[in-house]
Each structure stands twice: as C-alpha cells, then as structure tokens.
Image (cartoon, grey):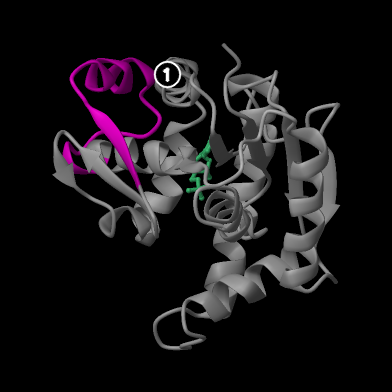
Amino acid sequence: MTRGPIIAIDGPAGAGKSTVARHLAQHFGLLNLESGAMYRAFALKAILNDQDFDDAAALERLAAETSVTLRPERGGNRVLLDGSDVTERIRDADVTQGASRVSVHPAIRAWLVGLQRELGRAGGVVMEGRDIGTVVFPDADLKVFLDASPEARSQRRYEQNGGDPAGSDQRAISKELRERDERDRNRADSPLRPAPDAVVIDSTAMPLDEVLARIEELVRTHCANLRAPEHA
Ligand code: DC
C-alpha cells in the first residue's frame, strides 16, 4: 500500500510557514501539523511547573509525565496539554521564547520527534517546523525551506499582531525574532538548516500569492502519490 504524501515546510520564525502549510492542506486535502505547537505546549508545562528551561534532567522528568496532543482542524491545530486546550495561551511571548529554549534539549526533541513521526506515518500531511526535512521525515516527498530577511519577517509579525505599537512594539518583535533565530540555528541537536534536497525559497521580495503558486507547482511535480482532494 502506498502512503499519502509527506510535505516538510521548514524555516525560521516569521517566514510564512504557517500560511503556506495551511493553504497547501486546504488546497490538496492534507492534514496540517504544526510541530512548533508541541514545543510550545511543553514550554507552557515548564512555566506552569516553575521549571527552569535550562535544567535538562528536570525537564526530561517533567516530559515523562506530560501529554501533548495536536488535533488538526480546518482552520489550524487545536493543542492539548494534559487534556486541556492551550491553543491560544501557547502563542504568548513567554511561551514563544520558552519553546525555543526547551527545544535545545535532545531528550525533549527525541520525545516530540517520536510523536511527530507517529502523527505523519500514514502520510497525507504537511508538517511545518525547523527539522522536518532534516530529522523528522528525511524521506519526505517534498521539502521546502522558506526563508526571508530578518527585517521582512519582523515586519510581517508586527502586521500580524495588528501593528499596534502599544501591544506589540516593533523593536521588541525584532529582538525576539533575532534571539530565537540565533538559538534555533546554533543549537547542537537538529539546528535549523535546509536539508540538502530542500527547495529553498526566499520570500523577502515575493508577494504571498506568488509564493503559494510556486509551492503548489512543486507539490504537483514532487508528489506523485497525491490523490485528488475531495474539496479543493
Ligand atoms: O514554529 P514555532 O514558532 O511555533 O516554534 C516555536 C519554537 O519551537 C521554535 O523557536 C523552535 C522550536 N521548534 C523546533 O525546535 N523544532 C520544530 N520542528 C518546531 C519548532
């Protein structure tokens, strides 16, 4: 039996991975799985337990008594932490930085990578993250590494947050992105980098509809195992 396609979308924060993955999932009838939401959920668990993000052994013990579940829905993923819906809370700034910090620990990565492989095993998925094409699914049918300049990425984040200077100061957003980039790219285990066979797309000067059209075309050429979607 052939499995459905596996599409990996990797790249730094703010490059547009979520928009692309959501679009591909709807357009081709695939499940959209946000691996970052799993690191976020575990970071929230650490916060709720007053746990130091740098204490690898304590985090590993905490992980052993934690359940993280992704529930894909049409508009995005619902995220459950120990059975409670934390979908909105995990987008807050403290969790965002925490996710990048807990994700440096190999034991935490091994645990969540195992869950991600389980979720994607049957195929028919588009999974976004940092190490999907390099580590989670090295045999993915299509690997896209979506990049953009730090300035373009922080500007987009700022606009996503409503461009509200009171709630989301642009300098703070750009500092937060730089710190996460630095950590995600330089960690020893599974650093953010394009797989050798990834298609790298720099969207700095590309309008969104062009990015989407380019990736749709890549999906058609790379995924021979793509069944016609029930509702495109
Ligand atoms: O994609 P995101 O912003 O939700 O990810 C939050 C953090 O989780 C990110 O800064 C690094 C980590 N992460 C990771 O290490 N590996 C992944 N596959 C996804 C996210």
User: Front-most of 139 and 2?
Assistant: 2
What residue is shown with label 1?
118
Q: Position of residue 24 (x, y in %)?
A: 61, 52
Farthest left residue in view = 83
Based on the picture, tell me whether residue 230 belongs to the magenta stretch: no
User: Residue 33 vs residue 28: left or right?
Assistant: left
Q: Which residues are magenta?
A: 47-72
Q: Ligand 1 within 8 A of label 1's CB?
A: no
Who is closer to the viewer here, 191 or 18? Answer: 18
Task: Decide: is 46 above or below 160.
Answer: above
Name the image quarter holding residue 189.
top right
Q: Position of residue 226 (x, y in %)?
A: 65, 35
| Residue ranking furthest to the top | 1
Secondary structure under tag 1 reads helix
Instruction: Write the residue at 78% across / 74% down.
Output: 207
Residue 110 lies, in percent from the top left, at: 46, 15
In this rendering, does residue 149 appear at all?
no
